[in-house]
Image: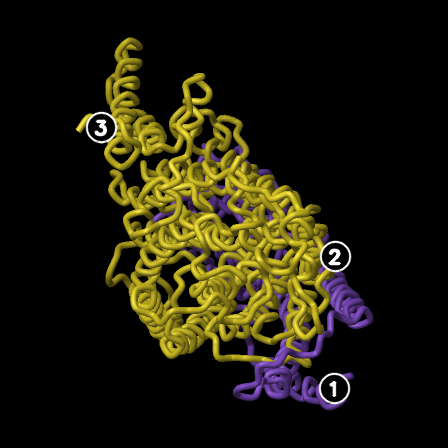
Amino acid sequence: MTAAIKRPGWIRGALGALAAAAFGFGLVLALRAISDLPLYQTEQTGYPHLIVPLILAPLGFLAGFGCFDYWLRWAAGMPTIPEDHSQHGAKSWKDYFRFNTDHKVIGIQYICTTFFFFFIGGLMAMLIRAELAQPGTQIVDAATYNSLFSTHAVLMIFVFVIPVFAGIANYVLPLMIGAPDMAFPRLNALSFWMLPLAGLLFIGSFLAPGGAFDAGWTGYAPLSTGAPLGQSFFNLGVQFAGASSIATALNFLVTIIVMRAPGMTFWRMPLLVWANLSTSLLVVAATPFIAGAQFMVLFDRILHTNFFDFAAGGDVISYQHIFWFYSHPAVYIMMLPGFGIISEVISTHARKPIFGYRLMALALIGIVVLSYSVWAHHMFVAGMFSWLRVPMMLTTLLIAVPTGIKIFSWLGTLYFGKIHTYSTAMLFSLAFIVTFTIGGISGVMLGMVPIDIHVSDTYFIVAHIHFVLFGGSVFTIFAGIYHWFPKMTGRMYDEKLGRVHFWGTVIGTWGTFIPMHWVGMDGMPRRVADYATQFGEWNLLISTFAFILGAVQLVFLYNMVVSWRFGPRAGANPWRANSIEWQVSSPPPIYNFTEIPRVVGGPYEFGVPGAKHAIMAGEGTEAAEKEPSVVGSP
Amino acid sequence: MYGRLPIVKMLAATVALTAAICAVMVPINWDGQQASTAAPKIDDLLTVMIVLSAFVFSLVMVMLFYALWKFKAKPGDESDGEPIHGNTRLEVAWTLIPTVIVLFAGGYSWSVLNDIEEPAENPLTVSVFSQQYAWSFAYPGKDYAWSEGEFHVPVNRQVQFKMHAQDVIHSFWVPEWRIKKDNVPGITTTAIVTPDKVGTYQLICTELCGFGHASMRAKVVVESPAKFREWVADLDQKVPPALMESVTDEQFEPTPVGTGGA
């Protein structure tokens, strides 16, 4: 038993969480007692005896689980325990529930965790659509409804779309650039383990007195500063998701900059690597703003700092500026990695080099730069300074240019290629071009101030964000999962079930989100539990398609789970792709490469006679001796 | 090395598809009834955008489906495509042409925006007060008359709404007017509108404000100036003293010279 308590793992993690929570609870009570305050403060924005333990318990869990062991020993001058390499890699499903520094294990941990939250968030969407199928109140009351759509959005954004891309890149990116692992494997593992904690805080808010947070995922002050306790769970969950995101982005930046294999120049990097480089540049600079915004709300709630309290001189609109300064770039954080996935899939399945590779990479950087200068387009009717609207409108419209470059270049890649559509990944990529074009068009319309004044905060917005986030990001996520499934698991998924999933998802997406444009323009506001009867038939139609969309995701789940266990063996390179991850076995060996590969050309040289992207171990004569091999993790 | 594309046929298909989409989409009245001078201008902008968007969408669809039809691999064909890495002229074209299009759209929007927000000489000022989950209205120019849950305005005269939120953010939207503005605690926001159609409409709160958000509505009546004056004269409540400091005295009757907004 004592051994189990000393060993990093679930038991020590649970004890750490309990100990930290008890310490926090005791500290608050002790401080209140010596200050002659009532021990328990239970105003809905207060509850310090719950908030402080809630901050400390996740940290206690992480410490107990072993996330900080190496660093703490090193900092204290104690002998550090060398990495127990028997823990590297995963031999059974149980190994995915351990602190593991292998980027491939962490990638799978990310993907499975985020899809868990995807299905929870999806169930909430089903409840939302069930309530909205008819006007009036049927299933949930208005307050619960507000909690449902808020939690749905927060789960999907913070613990599904953003981190699932980090998961896919975690698995694929080091292999792609010929690195044995990420630059900071321990930081990588810590980043992952903060994520389920964030998700649990979001879901756990349903247990709080007053219900889950209900001020929308945007959490506008002062609605959020005065909301019941659940709002604090949101404020805290965002800190863990944000810290996870920032640490991962730093890790990607360093990995991409310093860990590329010899010969892998910037202009030889696959576009997925470019996409994650761009995304990471956004995350490290923008994410601290949402962390700040949520800390300010939390401090307003429990410390009465009055940042956003208008009666005490606070400025309500400043919340929105800080929030959107993150949350607009966040839109691209949720899209750029998908652009990378689409480039890989389309080039491989069209058997053609990417059309205009350098312009594709520059377009990503262009989006990064522009996306910092458009945030106030979410605030055209918010009552901010009116002169800020026109410049923000122009920069917003200009983002359509690099985005258009990407669409046209993918189309150009198809021309004179040999297009194979047997893979579900390719089907999702092609469908993505169509849905994302529509989402982009409605985005341009929203960028135009006079149109935005009319449709802002209506169902038109709901339609637009779901077209770009579901028809955009989630389609690319499916494409990525199908594309790299054989690499990650060593087995093939069932293409027939993949097609059922694909067509169901496409029909469900269009049927659900296209009519929303119209009901929004016609006068239905968003975030309402009830609506005018004139929209009843449209909403019934929308809900019907939403249920199809929801149900067909179960086909995907079945396909993934069963194929992972029983699917036919996939070879190393079932898609005949060029990039390095396909040149190693499926799944790749524990340390990725016996020898670091040497990159000798671009990643998309399909049809170029004699062209090669990388020379792997045992290939060629000069490969091994001349290049210094980079092994081991720092 | 490789064949030529039927560019003329593809462009013709794009134009035909654009025309077909426009034939369906342009006649539809997307935004509903028009009841302010701003509404037709915003709807015209929307129509222009629908035409432009239909063209862009058609171009992408024609390019995509032609490629899928023409360049689909035959079963069993394991060969690679042509090793084409790009075409600088094409890439410059699809950078510059969209830039020109969006800048045109931006300039047009800007001019519409200036147009619909142009202040008239002698507007009617109505103060709007919002709180969870109710709307109230004051006519400071008319002895601080006060109305709850319903307001009237005269037809064909510019109205400037001075808006105040008393607890959280609310948003003022009358879809038929195409005008929306948040009411923000601590500051006064302004919306300008010239109603040009007599009728009864609904004011909708469009910023999430709590559990009663969906039902936070008010009745809007646009009527002749004579009826409007009568309605205001009949109001027997005054602005509550606590809110007086938010209300500035304003002209109520239009001056004979320059009946503003008419």
Amino acid type for the residue under numbered disc 1:
Leu
Q: Nearer the viewer, residue A280 or B117?
A: A280
Residue B53 appears in view: no
CA–CA distance between discs 3 and 2? 90 Å
- Which secondary structure lies at badge 3? helix
Amino acid carrying mark 2 in the image: Gly
At a point 44% along the width and 40% down the height, the residue shown is A191
Chain that is purple in the image: B
Instruction: Look at the numbered disc 2 and give the secondary structure of its residue.
Output: loop
Seen in the image, is A396 located left or right of residue A633? right
Q: Which residue is mark 1?
A: B5
Q: Is residue A610 left or right of residue A255?
A: right
Residue under label 3: A3
- On what subunit does the disc labeled 3 rest? A
Which is more foreground, mark 1 or mark 2? 1
Q: Where does label 2 land, which residue? A: B258
